[in-house]
Structure formats: C-alpha cells, structure tokens
Image (cartoon, grey):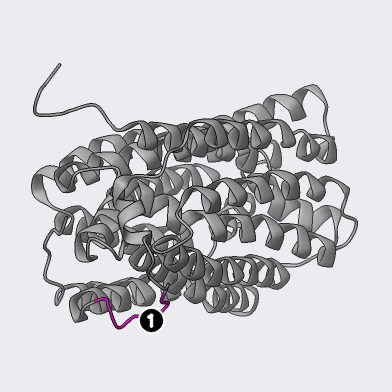
Amino acid sequence: MDESRPALPRNVKLLGWASCLNDIASEMIFPLLPQFLLTVLGGNRFYLGVIEGVADSVSSLLKLASGAWSDRALGRKRFVVFGYLLAAVSRPVIGVVTAPWQLFIARTADRVGKGIRTSPRDALIADSTAAEARGRAFGFHRAMDHLGAAIGPVLATAFLLAWPGQLRTLFLLTLAPGLLVVALLWLGLRETPATAAAASGKRSSWSLQPLDRNFRLYLAALVVFTLGNSSDAFLLVRAGELGVPTALLPLLWFVFHVVKSGGNLLVGRAVDRVGPRPPLLVGWFLYIGVYLAFGLATAAWQAWACFLIYGVFYALTEPAEKTLVANLAGAERKGLAFGWYNFAMGVAALPASVIFGALYQTLGPLAAFGWGAALALAAIVLLAGVRFRAQP
C-alpha cells in the first residue's frame, strides 16, 4: 500500500455507502418527478419551481440548526441516522399522492430528512479525516453518492420497460434501500474524538460571528452562484423539450451521474495536491458555458452533450467546495460552518428556482439559463477575494 495515501477512515466509507444506497432510492424517483407532476398530477413548470425551491429552503434551515447542534452536546450520529430514516419513509408516499399539493408535502418531508442529516454528516467526514486528505474524502463521498444516483435511474428504466406506466409502484419500492441505509449507519457509524471534545458541555450557537471574514466572503460568493443555479429538474424538462423521450430520461440521468461519480474521485485527489481554488474556478467557468448551451440547444443530441459537460462541472466543484468549507472553519466549528454553507445555498435555492421557473415560463429557456450564467460570472468576481488556507 502507498504509505503517502492511507486508507480512508471507517466513517468516510460507511457514509459513502450510505449515500450510494440512499441515492439509489432517491434517483429512482427524481428524474421522473417533473413529468409525474406535469402529466399525471396536472401541475405546471412554475409549480415545479415552487415545490423544489420551498422544499430545498426548508431543508436548508434545518441544515444550519443540525450543524450547530451537532458541534455541541448532541453529537453528529443521531442527526445523520434520523435524517436518513425520515427520507426513507417519506419518499414512498409519492407513490400514493393524487394532487400537486400532496406531492409538495411528500417532497418537503424528504428534504427535511436531508436537512437534518447533511451538515452533521459533512462535519463528521471532516472530523474523521486529516486536513491533507479531505479532498479525497469528500471526493469519495460524492463519488459514491453519484454512483447511487447513476444506479437508481437504471433500475427505474428497467422497471418501466418491464412494467410500462407503473410509476406509483416504482416509487413505493424505494422503501427497501432507504431502510437498509438506516440499519447500516445505526450499527456501524461512530462519533469521533473531535466531535466528543467539541460537544463537551458547550452551548450550541447558530451565529455566523465565530466564522471569520474570509469564510463569510466565500459564503457570499456561493450564495450569488446558487441564486443562478436552479433545481436540476429544469434540465430534465429542457431535455424533454429537445426531444429526449420520457422513457430515456432515467438513462440520461444515469450517464450524468456516471460522469459526476468518476470525476469526483479524480478531482478529489487533485484538490489535495493543488488546492481547491483551481478546480472551483474552472468548474464555475464551465458552468457559464454549459448553461448558455442549454438555452441555445435545438436538438436531443445537444441535450445529451450538455448533460455530460454539466456532470464535469459538478465533479470539478463538489470536492473543492466542501474541502474549502472544512479548511476555513475552526477545529470546533465544522458543524456550524457546514450548517451555514448548506443553509445559505438552500435559502438561495428558493428564489433561484422560482425566478428560473418564472423566466422559463414567460420568456423562454434562453432567458432563464442566461440569468444563471450571469450570476455565475458575478460569483467568480467575489471568489477572487477569498484567501485559501487549511485549518485542522
């Protein structure tokens, strides 16, 4: 074994596999959700933006609270396990809804589970890993997440080819992998010494004040970027408009996540060597180009090409973003830092998706995607002022 590259910690591996299984369940549903809303439940694109934006924003408030609380007396494991449990039992409910407002409730419950678990999980990964290996740890976790997201649509496609039109039955079947995640983490996940030390007798704080100005500037850049980065559900709508058949949307989602998974493994290692700044900047510039391409595309093959490039954007930015959050946070503030990171981006997701949906509905795809590209450029300007450094 290469001594310079030690094995990933047990917690990182467990959380990676948990994310893989969870996303198998989640992505058996998500690629089909826009068409389910539009064609089965009678909703519209604006309502899709409201559902995704509100659900993600509610989730984000919980990401802040759970991150701050997990730094202190409550620890991290219980938040991670309960968050996955809530998602596991709420997703199958989508299989029995009959109206858009019912879908809104079920989707929000799923996102509440995500809100409870996300920041404590990210902080636990950072706690479990040395600073010089965080890029690889976060790259592995995101790669496993996307592997599950790739497998889920394949299973969905196979199921729908065998049993055409049985969307509701497919959604109900997602209960099984969700419960397997809960069992895996309940039995295997461990608190780290860093978590226990930080939690010893201290009161939790949600304040941004303990996090320095450099972190706050980075957070501002992320918020501006996220205001132009709406739900990826709109990309699936766009693919459908460009001629990708509904039955092939899960396959398109599969290819997208294969690119994200493999790319995260490679970029995670690169982040540890060159730092998070170069991959993050390249990723954001690539985002500008691919969003403009989505707006200008006229054929189905172009939708496939755009999704491939968009997967590269994710691979470049995901391990870099989270490594930078961990590096800019103090040793005892990782939960709070990840809480603010996830909270700020999620709060921005509500206006992002609503504005994007309104622009899409009234002015067309080029106006909506052009808005996203313009805000990404503004975020790059803000990012130039961030000083990159590592903390324990």
Say if residue 166 shows up in the picture. Answer: yes
Q: Is residue 110 left or right of residue 162?
A: left
Q: Is residue 271 left or right of residue 314?
A: left
Is residue 206 covered in magenta? yes
Residue at (64%, 48%) from the top-left corner? Answer: 30
Task: Name the residue nearer the viewer: 225 or 333.
Answer: 333
Say if residue 228 shows up in the picture. Answer: no
Q: Total number of numbered labels?
A: 1
Q: Amino acid at mark 1?
A: Ser
What quarter of the picture does the N terminus occupy?
top left
Q: Which residue is mark 1?
A: 207
Q: Residue 71: x and y, percent?
A: 39, 62
Residue at the extreme front: 201
Q: Residue 267: x and y, percent?
A: 24, 42
Q: Is residue 272 left or right of residue 100?
A: left
Residue at (9%, 28%) from the top-left corner? Answer: 4
Residue 339 figure quarter: bottom left
Task: Name the residue nearer the viewer: 158 or 17.
Answer: 17
Task: Name the residue nearer the viewer: 328 or 24.
Answer: 328
Is residue 318 covered in magenta? no
Residue 319 higher or lower than 11, as above or below: below
Q: Residue 244: x and y, percent?
A: 61, 43
Residue 272 higher or lower than 112, as above or below: above
Q: Residue 17: x and y, percent?
A: 47, 31
Residue at the extreme top: 1
From the image, give the main secondary structure of the stretch colored magenta: loop
Residue 25 higher or lower than 216, as above or below: above
Residue at (41%, 73%) from the top-left corner? Answer: 203
Instruction: Say few, some or many: other residues with alpha carbon within 10 Å of mark 1 (under 14 / 14 to 19 / 20 or more).
Output: few
Residue range (magenta): 205-211
Residue 76 higher or lower than 252, as above or below: below
- Determine whether the residue tagged by mark 1 lies in a helix, strand or loop: loop
